[in-house]
Image (cartoon, rainbow, N blue to C red):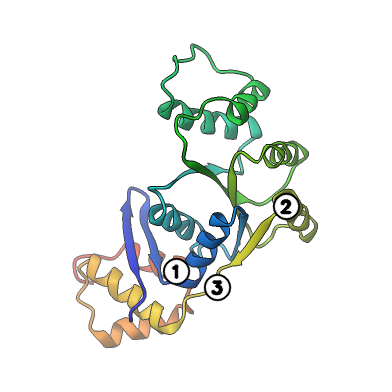
């Protein structure tokens, strides 16, 4: 059976998801068991795409909040608060709250429904003291589960600390696509871009990419009109 292929077209380019059945099941199983997830893999390998795919698969029972971990704790909490505010029927706030007040409201206030909520921390590259403090507060309250997408260059000590903060947690590592998945991906993107490539050209290009999704997308992004 051919792997699942999903292509999303967005203003900034092409988002993709292909294969990853094993990784998808591992993430869902961990969440259903009440654990947090740490996603590892090279930049452009499809970690965020995997998290978004999981959100689509179980989105009827869960609510996912995607947060850029490169932002400050205050900015992350403001983003979360805005997401909860859209779901809550409470009165509108006239002005932004302080970071600590916003954090308290997120951890203890009404979030608008009875579903299980997952916070996806994307771009986790460095753990500052302020971010460690924020994560510790979230972990202590145990109101949310988390998926943390870490960069490969994160320091070993910081990764150990992150796993301790997020315990109980499961680490899911994402590798390069295999040959069959790469062929399928290139074939799907070529069709989506309406390129007049024959099968030989598709396979030749696929074999030259090493199964790196972002490299494939970057090469095909600017091509069109049958080139």
Farthest residue to the bottom: give it: 200
Q: Earlier in the sequence, mark 3 or mark 1?
A: 3
Q: Earlier in the sequence, mark 2 or mark 3?
A: 2
Q: CA distance from mark 2 to mark 3?
A: 21 Å
Quadrant of the image occupied by residue 37: bottom right
Q: CA distance from mark 3 to mark 1?
A: 10 Å
Is 8 left or right of 72, judged from the image as shown? Answer: left
Say few, some or many: other residues with alpha carbon within 10 Å of mark 1 (under 14 / 14 to 19 / 20 or more).
Answer: many
Say what secondary structure mark 3 lies in. loop
- Front label number (2 vs 3): 2
The N terminus lies in which quarter of the figure?
bottom left
Q: Which residue is mark 1?
A: 213
Say what secondary structure mark 1 lies in. helix
Q: Which residue is mark 3?
A: 175
Instruction: From this view, report whether residue 121 is shown above or below residue 2.
Output: above
- Front label number (3 vs 1): 3
| Point 33% across, 48% down: residue | 11
| Point 48% across, 63% down: residue | 46
| Point 60% across, 24% down: residue | 105
Instruction: From this view, report whether residue 17 is shown above or below residue 67.
Output: below
Q: Residue 16 in the image: x percent, y percent?
A: 38, 62
| Point 46% across, 32% down: residue | 83
Instruction: From this view, report whether residue 182 is shown above or below residue 14.
Output: below
Is 91 left or right of 166, judged from the image as shown? Answer: left
Q: Which residue is mark 2?
A: 162
Quadrant of the image occupied by residue 98: top right
Q: Residue 38 in the image: x percent, y percent?
A: 62, 57
As rendered, which of 215 and 8 lies closer to the eye? 8
Q: Earlier in the sequence, mark 2 or mark 1?
A: 2
Total numbered circles: 3
């Amino acid at each position: 059976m051919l792997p699942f292929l999903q292509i999303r077209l967005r203003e900034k380019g092409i988002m993709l998801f292909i294969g990853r059945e094993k990784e998808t099941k591992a993430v869902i199983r961990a969440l259903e068991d009440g654990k947090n997830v740490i996603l590892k893999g090279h930049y452009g390998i499809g970690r965020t795409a995997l998290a978004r795919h999981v959100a689509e698969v179980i989105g009827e029972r869960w609510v996912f909040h995607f947060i850029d971990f490169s932002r400050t704790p205050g900015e992350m909490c403001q983003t979360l608060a805005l997401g909860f505010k859209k779901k809550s029927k409470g009165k509108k706030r006239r002005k932004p709250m302080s970071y600590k007040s916003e954090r308290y409201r997120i951890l203890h206030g009404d979030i608008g429904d009875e579903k299980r909520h997952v916070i996806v921390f994307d771009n986790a590259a460095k753990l500052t003291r302020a971010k460690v403090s924020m994560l510790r507060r979230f972990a202590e309250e145990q109101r949310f589960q988390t998926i943390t997408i870490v960069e490969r260059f994160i320091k070993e000590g910081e990764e150990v600390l992150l796993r301790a903060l997020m315990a109980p947690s499961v680490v899911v590592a994402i590798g390069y696509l295999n040959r069959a998945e790469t062929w399928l991906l290139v074939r799907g993107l070529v069709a989506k871009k309406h390129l007049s490539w024959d099968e030989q050209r598709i396979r030749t290009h696929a074999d030259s990419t090493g199964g790196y999704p972002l490299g494939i997308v970057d090469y095909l992004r600017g091509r069109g009109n049958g080139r």
